[in-house]
Amino acid sequence: MSTVIKQQTPSEWEHFWKTNPSGFDEIMLRSTAYFADKLEAEYPGKKTERLLDLGCGPGFLTGLLKDHYAYIHGTDISSAYVDACRLRFSDAQNVEFSLSAAYDFEYYIKVIERKQITRVVMLSVLQYYRSVEEVKGLLVALKAASETQKFVCLLADVIPTGHSMFSDIGSIVLQALKNGYALKFARFITYALFSDYRKTKKQGLLQIDPDFFKQAARDLNVKVTFVKGLSIHSGRYNVLLDFTK
């Protein structure tokens, strides 16, 4: 694991997210708010910390956390999302956004180093990678960045191997009923069934065995901790990588 991998061929998922599918926004906001609450309870932000929201989408996580950090940089592959974020947070002094190509690991290194990032969060992103080889490329890049800038990285909402999507739906339904947004969830399901999401979904979502991260941590000499309960999806897990040593 000594080479930074940079993919060039776009995937169907990359194309899907670049179209700025607003039909996901309501459910995405709800699930992100759930995550942000759990994250702050487990790993509260500090005014001295500088956060990279890697795969920031419409900026929901940045918006929920910006008052807890000295600085947040959000980056995404969707120009529409990045433009919307810049407009929404135009008055925020501690927030910046940038457009990045998919799997541009060299760019991630530059952002971490130049912006002096101390925390990286990647929420519900790894599932759209095409292979564990691409995930390896990401981890190698993060290790390279840590040679000059120390930080911790949380890879959140990772799908384990053998995971059923029905489990995800069940978790969201329970939260929707509990918090009074069942109608909005029904609208989301309708969108998912009749939009390009259904066609793209057939490509599948990447599932990663936790043992992959254990081996990667050994190869890179990085401490790894597995955290449950941060995501609205009860069957998924979170990986905390310590690049401060």
Image (cartoon, helix red, strand yellow):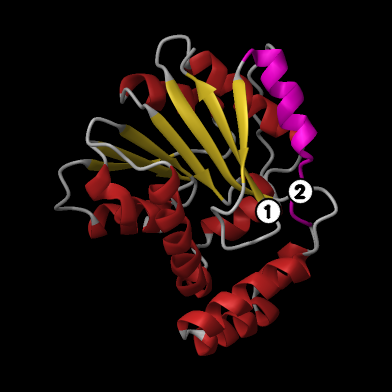
Left or right of residue 167, residue 36 in this image: left
Neighbor class of circle 1 (other Cα within 10 Å; few <14, some 14-19, many 20+) is: many
Neighbor class of circle 2 (other Cα within 10 Å; few <14, some 14-19, many 20+) is: some
Q: Are marks 1 and 2 in contact (CB under 8 Å)?
A: yes
Give the farthest residue toward the bottom: 183
Residue 185 spot, x, y in % from top left: 56, 82
Rendered image quadrant of residue 80: bottom left
Residue 102 spot, x, y in % from top left: 57, 40
Q: Which label was assigned to residue 6?
A: none
Residue 216 forms part of the magenta stretch:
yes
Which residue is label 1 attached to? 236
Residue 183 in sight in this render:
yes
Which residue is label 2 attached to? 160
The residue at the point 30 percent across, 40 percent down is 72
Picture layout, residue 64 above or below residue 109: below
Residue 78 forms part of the magenta stretch:
no
The residue at the point 47 percent across, 86 percent down is 180
Q: Earlier in the sequence, mark 1 or mark 2?
A: 2
Q: Disc 1 marks which amino acid?
A: Arg
Of the pair 145 and 177, the residue shown nearer to us? 177
- What residue span does the magenta drawing correspond to? 204-221
Give the farthest residue toward the front: 41
Give the secondary structure at mark 1: loop
Dominant secondary structure of the residues highlighted in magenta in the image: helix
Residue 188 spot, x, y in % from top left: 57, 80
How far separated are the C-alphas under marks 1 and 2? 6 Å
Give the secondary structure at mark 2: loop
